[in-house]
Image (tube, coloured by chain):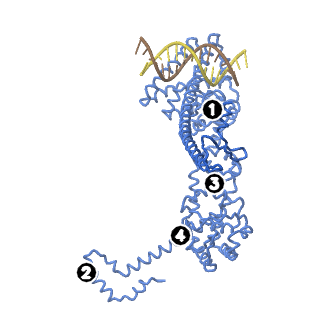
Chain colours: A blue, B brown, C yellow
Amino acid sequence: MLPVDFCASVIISEQDMNLIDILWKQDIDLGASREVFDYNHRQKEHELQRQLELQEEKRLHLLQEQEKALLAQLQLDEETGEYVPRPAPVPALQSAIMPLEVSQDVGFPADSSDAMSFDECLQLLAETFPVEETENTSVSLNASEVAPMASPELSVVPSTTQSPGSLSGSSMPAMYPELEEAWMELLSLPELQPCLNIKMEDAVETTAYPLPNSPAGQQPKGPFYPPNCSKVETNNINVCPAEFMNTVEGSVPRMVQSDHLNQAHNPAFGADFAAKNFDEMFYPNPILEESTGQRGLDGSNSDAMSDMASQPFTPADLYSLSPGDALDQHELMAELPDSDSGISSHTSPNASSPGKSLYGDGSFHHSDSDMDEMDQNPGSAETDFSEMFTINFQPDDLQPTPSESALQRSEQQMEGKLERHEMDSVEECGPRCSPFTKDKKRRTDARLSRDEQRAKALKIPLSVSMIINLPVDDFKELLSKHHLNDAQMALVQDIRRRGKNKVAAQNCRKRKMENIVGLEGELDSLKEEKERLLSEKVQRAAQLKQMKQQLSSLYLEVFSKLRDDKGNSYSPSEYSLQQSTNGSIFLVPRVKKTFAKSD
DNA sequence: ACCCGCTGTCATCAA
DNA sequence: GATTGATGACAGCGG
């Protein structure tokens, strides 16, 4: 197999080399290096090139092998054209043959361990069964033909094989019974087994844990599902299975947030080590995560409170959350269905009713100005949410039923947090705040201070924020703890009413503005629709006019060809053509019609 | 001084 | 009946 120039070079004598030397010395002025004439150098170059070619060839074979093994896990869905995981574990024969029936732009980097064995197998098959291409089955076992995997010749064969028996009855094996035997031989090769076994394990593993809550027939979007794999495969060339799985894992963090709530509590799914890994990776504290999830989704006050009380959850946990965690909380809250409290309202167009969120119906409300500051200062928003959780859940964290001490503690905390929140808001506002925001804040402060001044004047031992934001039960309990006179009670009720109405008015105005915007958009679309219909009407009118003209000319043409017994033509002014219900056409004299009218 | 937009508040209704 | 949310109307404030 030595190249011709190599064989020729062998007989180059020393004399020739000397001649080359002389020539080289002559050509050296022309810039040619000696390696150009050096036989040894050229030989080395050629060997290097040969090695590269061989490596490339091996690599291609391995790509095909891995592609086949991976595609063996998948089954072509004839309806969608996608590859879906096989419903049941597939025998090795089928998994090995199926990939040859499909063509996808799939390839994987070489795994050098199995290169020679598969190469030999292919060689054996190519020698034993010269493949003849048929019209419908473009099965190509020759390595040189398989190599261009993206070739359109390797079209998809519409065969859904479920078992080796049915497989033998389907297209390819039925036509190639010897081929099936050869494949059995091939699959029995010890060098090939590890590869195929690995792939089949992957196939079983990926189909063994269907995602919970995923409707039948729907492609689940979980991280370990082959449908995702198939999509990735078909779009990426040279992705080996391992890398491919890594790729899927890499995309998991985006999916975990949505899928985690459903998946984390499923025993089967939890058995998956990868799922556990993800849990540990993204939710180091499952208890905390679970509790926050329930907090976010549980709208009932007492249940949430009791849950919180039964769980080792402390405000410190919330304060220890990283910014990302806090933001996750924020996002989770923002996704609450129809939570129209003042807190979540700035993410939901229809957010309105304050107080249906975390704390039953007593969440901490923030005015629009507060929300604006949150928007402008994510850090403060983050701390605000932490504070909110702290305020709301601290009492029940300590005692299942709020006692006086817990209530007092909550008062102190709420006051402290609110004061700090206000101070932070003012301090953190800084030069970034617009004059408008500053103005709003100043007015809000003025408003609050007005109520606070009234409260101070009547010596009400409660903060305005508590009066407004406490749930009704806690508020009543708080009032029962402090013995207030009638004037104080009235003022407290007024403050609470005003505070709640203020938030309601803000939500109402926000909603109204959104309605206006929506109606404007609807108006624009209706105007466009009107324009379209008008132009269509003009077009139809033109068409109708044209058809009428054609009909008129046809009418006159027919009349001009009508003759009476004497061969005279009928006058269109005296006669008219009319069609009866049965389709026959009569020539009706107009004179009669005129008489009828005159009568 | 007037206008306009924003915001808080009140009154009222409905759930 | 009490509570709360929604909303129209009004007033005050500031640009």
Residue A500, image quadrant: top right
- Which residue carries the number 2 mark? A26
Are dots 2 and 4 on a single chain? yes
Q: Amino acid at mark 2?
A: Gln
Are dots 4 and 1 on a single chain? yes
In this rendering, the count of numbered labels is 4
- Disc 2 to disc 4, C-alpha distance: 44 Å
**SS state under label 1:** loop
Q: Image point 66% across, 72% down: which residue?
A: A187
Are dots 3 and 4 on a single chain? yes
Q: Compare marks 2 and 3 and give the one earlier in the sequence.
A: 2
The picture places residue B5, in percent across and down from the top left corner, at 48, 23
Q: Is residue A62 above or below residue A25?
A: above
- Disc 3 to disc 4, C-alpha distance: 28 Å
Looking at the rendered structure, which numbered label has been put on residue A339?
1
**SS state under label 2:** helix
- Which residue carries the number 4 mark? A59
Q: Chain of mark 4?
A: A
Residue A155, image quadrant: bottom right
Question: Which one is in front in this view, the residue at disc 3 or the one at disc 1?
Answer: 1
**SS state under label 3:** loop
The picture places residue A265, in percent across and down from the top left corner, at 69, 45
Q: Image point 64% across, 10% down: which residue?
A: A485
Looking at the rendered structure, which numbered label has been put on residue A271?
none
Decide if residue A200 is on the left or right side of residue A439: right
Q: Compare marks 2 and 4 and give the one earlier in the sequence.
A: 2
